Image: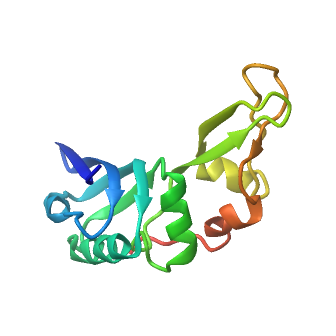
Amino acid sequence: MPVDIDIRHVGDKSYVEIRGVVDENANFDALATLRERAEVNLRGVRRINSYGARAWMDALRRVAESTRLEFVECSSPVIDQINMLEGFLAHAPVRSFVAPLVCEHCDVQIDHVFDTREVRNHHQSLPPVECDRCHRPMVLDDLEDQYLLFLREPTKLR
């Protein structure tokens, strides 16, 4: 699935939704139209390879310096890249992110959206999420310290 970018402009703010695979075929030219503030939803990003990561970072460098970016619902592949590559999000803040959770009792798996501030206020760990089926606490289907690495070194607005 190639990368798909939807952009809506409302007043001085742009709302961006990016879906698909970020690879050597990804075209981010549409990001040049962003307004003063831009909320970028990355929940639909399914995979990112090294060529795509480079193209993404180059595209963010070309976004107007006056544009204040913020990222919401960052998918697991995006979180992996944030944790590996300094400046992957052009030092813009992550307002929320998706974490894969699993219930160790009944094996239910979900993707849950966490507000970054809520996690920081919870001592840099994930607040409890109850399983809808058995009502027991769910756990991150990854190593929490590594997954939440990006929270220990918060990005700054450029």
What's the residue at 51%, 52% (across, down)? Answer: 95
Instruction: Point out the residue furthest to the top here.
Output: 133
Give the x, y percent position of residue 89: 42, 69
Along the line of sight, which residue is nearer the eye, 2 or 82?
2
Where is 147 relative to 74, above or below?
Answer: below
Give the x, y percent position of residue 155: 52, 71
What's the residue at 24%, 70% (across, down)? Answer: 66
Q: Is residue 48 left or right of residue 82?
A: left
Give the x, y percent position of residue 74: 48, 53
What's the residue at 73%, 52% (across, down)? Answer: 121
Give the x, y percent position of residue 56: 31, 70
Where is 111 relative to 16, above or below?
Answer: above
Q: Is residue 36 left or right of residue 84?
A: left
What's the residue at 78%, 34% (across, down)? Answer: 103
Along the line of sight, which residue is nearer the eye, 22 or 85?
22
The quadrant holding residue 142 is bottom right
Q: Is residue 96 left or right of residue 4?
A: right
Residue 127 visible in the current orientation: no
Q: How is the image coloured?
A: rainbow
The quadrant holding residue 112 is top right
| Quarter of the image with the C terminus in it | bottom left
Residue 123 visible in the current orientation: yes
